[in-house]
Image (spheres, grey):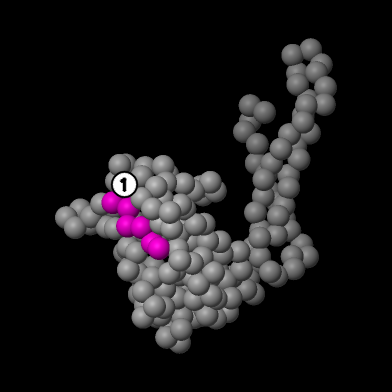
């Protein structure tokens, strides 16, 4: 994920014709109209209910080339502030922990911005203000089926861990190099993990 969002990075999405995907959604400035608050919660919750990703408000899609951006579409931050957008998104239930909104100043005007909304993958099912559940599929937000909702609800009760490795050389004897392997296990979920089994298979050459 890009952390230092700026106008240059947004323009790169246009020139490189980066397509929308299940984890990337473009929205024009009018997507923040006050009568579209429900659509905002629908699109954000859909990302959280899938694999997380980005929604970028302030990019106008190309009229002929589907799913790519034609140009910047500035948002007036005096009319639609970061705080206003945050309040709208916070109507999603339950609250999406770790969601971040990046305001990106645009050179077209003093109050012109785009908003990059970074949505983490949810740990449970998140409900839009329509009282419905959505997920991303084929470039759009669609209603969740019953079996999908059950799977999402089980996220919070399922253990989730990741493993990373580091190594440190301890000694050298002739041509032989001796290392200590340092695995690091991280609990990425909310459920306490009491036991964790890690099996490592080394190539014969080692």
Residue 147 position by quadrant: bottom left
Q: Please name the predominant secondary structure of the magenta segment in the image.
A: strand
The residue pinned by badge 1 equals 14
Is the residue 183 above or below the residue 157 in the image?
above
Is the residue 31 above or below the residue 205 in the image?
below
Most extreme residue toward the top is 174
Is the residue 68 above or below the residue 82 in the image?
above
The percent position of residue 62, horizontal first and vertical second, equals 23, 55
The percent position of residue 38, horizontal first and vertical second, equals 40, 80
Most extreme residue toward the left is 64
The percent position of residue 1, horizontal first and vertical second, equals 51, 49
Does residue 93 appear in this view? Answer: yes
Most extreme residue toward the front is 110
Residue 155 position by quadrant: bottom right
Does residue 152 appear in this view? Answer: no
Q: Which residues are magenta?
A: 71-76
Side of 104 relative to 154 (left or right): left
- Comparing 97 with 115, the one in front is 115
């Amino acid at each position: 994920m890009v952390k230092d969002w700026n106008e240059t990075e947004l323009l790169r999405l246009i020139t490189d014709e980066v397509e929308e995907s299940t984890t990337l959604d473009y929205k024009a400035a009018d997507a923040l109209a006050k009568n579209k608050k429900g659509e905002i919660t629908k699109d954000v919750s859909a990302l959280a209910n899938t694999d997380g990703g980005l929604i970028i408000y302030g990019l106008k899609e190309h009229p002929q080339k589907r799913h790519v951006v034609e140009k910047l579409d500035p948002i007036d931050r005096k009319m639609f502030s970061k705080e206003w957008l945050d309040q709208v998104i916070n109507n999603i239930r339950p609250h999406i922990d770790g969601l971040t909104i990046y305001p990106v100043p645009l050179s077209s005007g003093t109050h012109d911005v785009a908003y990059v909304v970074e949505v983490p993958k949810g740990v449970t099912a998140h409900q839009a203000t329509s009282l419905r559940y959505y997920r991303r599929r084929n470039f759009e937000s669609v209603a969740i089926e019953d079996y999908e909702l059950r799977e999402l609800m089980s996220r919070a009760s399922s253990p989730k861990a990741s493993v990373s490795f580091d190594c440190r050389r301890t000694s050298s004897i002739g041509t032989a190099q001796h290392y200590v392997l340092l695995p690091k296990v991280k609990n990425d979920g909310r459920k306490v993990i009491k036991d964790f089994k890690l099996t490592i298979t080394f190539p014969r050459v080692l």
